[in-house]
Image (cartoon, rainbow, N blue to C red):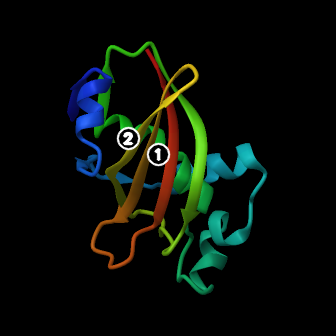
Amino acid sequence: MRIFQGIDELVAAVGEHLGHSRWHTVSQHQIDGFAEVTGDSQWIHTDPQRAAQGPFQGPIAHGYLTLSLLPMLSWEVYRVDGVSMVINYGSNRIRFPSVVPVGSSVRAGIELLSVEPAASGVQVITRVTIGIEDAVKPACIAEIVSLLVP
């Protein structure tokens, strides 16, 4: 975990790769829970028998499930001390180059792209790449916008 002692230290790190999270295994239980919460119960995610005969030879995580792991994974990579809160402001770009088969392990790598003044703090833009263990292509590449409030 990389810890920044305030926004000035974060500004000094613009352009750097901040590190990687630990590996986390994506389970069928997580996929089923995500399907229940979102109403997306497509068989490629929730029916292991049918999915075994499908294009991915087994069930895969929803793309948005993979994206939803971002907060957990990001908190393992870095934090900024001296701010009262971090607000998810949105995303500039999200792509899902590869599927995440059930049982795969994923982790996030984070690059700090920019830190700019904003009305109530600073706007931070990071590029988060969620990799899949032993895979060539990442599962997700997302440009994330956060607001840090001092």
Q: Position of residue 124 (x, y in %)?
A: 44, 38
Q: Residue at x 44, y 12 (%)?
A: 84
How packed is label 1: few (under 14 Cα within 10 Å), some, or many (20 or more)? Answer: some
Residue at disc 1, secondary structure: helix
| Viewer-side residue, 121 vs 103 | 121
Relative to 20, 143 lies left or right:
right
- Alpha carbon of mark 1 to alpha carbon of mark 2: how far? 6 Å
Q: Residue furthest right?
A: 39
- The one nearer the camera, 78 or 113, is 113
Total marks shown come to: 2
Residue that appears at 50% across and 47% down: 144
Classed neighbour count for the residue bearing mark 2: other residues with Cα under 10 Å, few (<14), some (14–19), many (≥20): many
Q: Quadrant of residue 104?
A: bottom left
Residue type of the residue flagged with mark 1: Leu
Residue 113 lies left or right of residue 91; in this view the side is left
> What quarter of the picture does the N terminus occupy?
top left
Q: Residue at x 37, y 54 (%)?
A: 25
Q: Position of residue 47 (x, y in %)?
A: 66, 68
Say which residue label 1 marks.
Answer: 70
- Are discs 1 and 2 less than 8 Å apart at CB? yes
* Quadrant (top left/top right/bottom left/bottom right) for the C terminus: top left
- Residue 61 shows in this picture: no
The amino acid type of the residue labelled 2 equals: Ser
Q: Is residue 122 left or right of residue 32?
A: left
Residue pointed to by mark 2? 74
- With respect to residue 20, does 61 lie above or below? below
Q: Is residue 41 above or below residue 57?
A: above
* Secondary structure found at label 2: helix
